[in-house]
Image (cartoon, grey):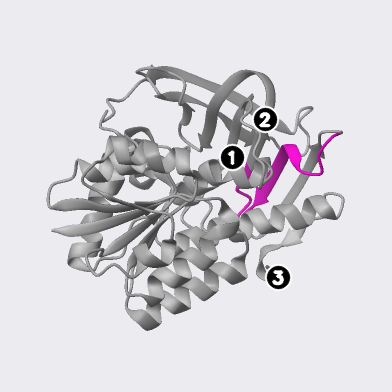
Amino acid sequence: MIGIGLVGYGYWGPNLARNFSRQPDCSLVAICDSDAKKAEQAALAYPGAEIVDDFEKLARNPGIDAVAIATPVSSHYPLAKLALEEGKDVLLEKPFTRTSNEARELIDIARKNGRIIAVDHTFLYTGAVRKMKELVDSGEIGDLIYIDSVRVNLGLFQQDVNVIYDLAPHDISIAQFLIGRDPVSVQAVGACHEDSDMEYLAYIHLEYEGGLQAHFHMNWLSPVKVRRTMIAGGNKMIVYDDMEPSEKVKVYDKGIDIRRGDSMSLYKIYVDYRTGDMVAPKIEQKEALALEAEHFLDCVRDRKTPLTDARQGLSVVRIIEAAQISIDNGGKKVNLENV
């Protein structure tokens, strides 16, 4: 039986509590929240769990093997540090940390204490993203050419982070999962609301070795909610629409074949357009967070490296941090090696 402690019962915490409480051989031992109203809600929902307002008490509870942290990103580092030093494994809500230096320090602390860190990049556990990974790794799509992603909606304006830290971890983690390596450089631009100094709108552009490019558009101030990603390969293309109720992934046998003419040709380049079938592959419908909770518990039990481990979390934080540096410097290209 693995004992879980949860800190943070706000927006995401109840989802973590629900999924861990339903896992076999797992007990939700304690929930921590300093807000009295949220603590009361937690007590009503989970009468068997101890409700505390002091995280140190939770972290030092000998009945707790692992801690799930669902709090504002500014608190991730100190909470995770204490939990790791107290011998607990840790699951951290995205983004992993506010800075790459904080992420590296947590990785060092976890290694010294023999602990596991997982980052809650939930989309990597969805059937849609796992299917796309399968298509990319099998070679069916061909060599990747570009990834173009849009994640916009009206709200939810955050009080402690801008739109990059709030929304970009989702799509960047998906791109990193599919591509399997870090970009070479990052560029970004953004805009702040007149009454705030935090960006509500941002565009992030990544360049990889070999010419592959990825582009992300995030916006808190959109009249419609859009969650769409296009992935172009040399053979086929994928459209991933998370707002679709069933056919979230569609594979298009579309593309172009370019031939170069001789030096005497009027047109030096010939373009042949290829249009074939569209296929919507079958996708597993099990809740991603349930799969993530199950996977995390397996890693705790068997001492395995999680799919979304601290290294993957660090990779995403480095890109976000580089994007913020680029925005602060008028969209200047930032070499990721320097972050």
Q: Is residue 26 left or right of residue 140?
A: left
Few, some or many C-alpha atoms within 10 Å of disc 3 (few <14, some 14-19, many ≥20)? few
**Dots 1, 2 in contact, CB < 8 A:** yes
Residue 152 horizontal/vertical position (percent):
62, 28
Residue carrying label 2: 220
Q: Residue at x 34, y 18 (%)?
A: 246
Residue carrying label 1: 167
* Viewer can see residue 130: no
Q: Earlier in the sequence, mark 3 or mark 1?
A: 1
Q: Is residue 5 above or below residue 110?
A: above
- Amino acid type indicated by mark 1: Leu
Q: Is residue 35 left or right of residue 118?
A: right
Q: Secondary structure at mark 3?
A: helix
The quadrant in which the C terminus is found is bottom right
**Range covered by the magenta-colored residues:** 195-214
Examine the structure image and report whether residue 207 is included in the region drawn in magenta: yes
Residue 137 horizontal/vertical position (percent):
36, 47
- Amino acid type indicated by mark 2: Trp
Q: Residue at x 53, y 52 (%)?
A: 95
The quadrant in which the N terminus is found is bottom left
Examine the structure image and report whether residue 319 is included in the region drawn in magenta: no
Of all residues, the one furthest to the bottom in this rendering is 112
Q: Secondary structure at mark 2?
A: loop
Q: Earlier in the sequence, mark 2 or mark 3?
A: 2
- Amino acid type indicated by mark 3: Asn
Cα distance between the residues tagged 1 and 2: 9 Å
**Dots 2, 3 in contact, CB < 8 A:** no
Question: Which dot marks residue 338?
Answer: 3
* Viewer can see residue 270: yes
Cα distance between the residues tagged 2 and 3: 29 Å
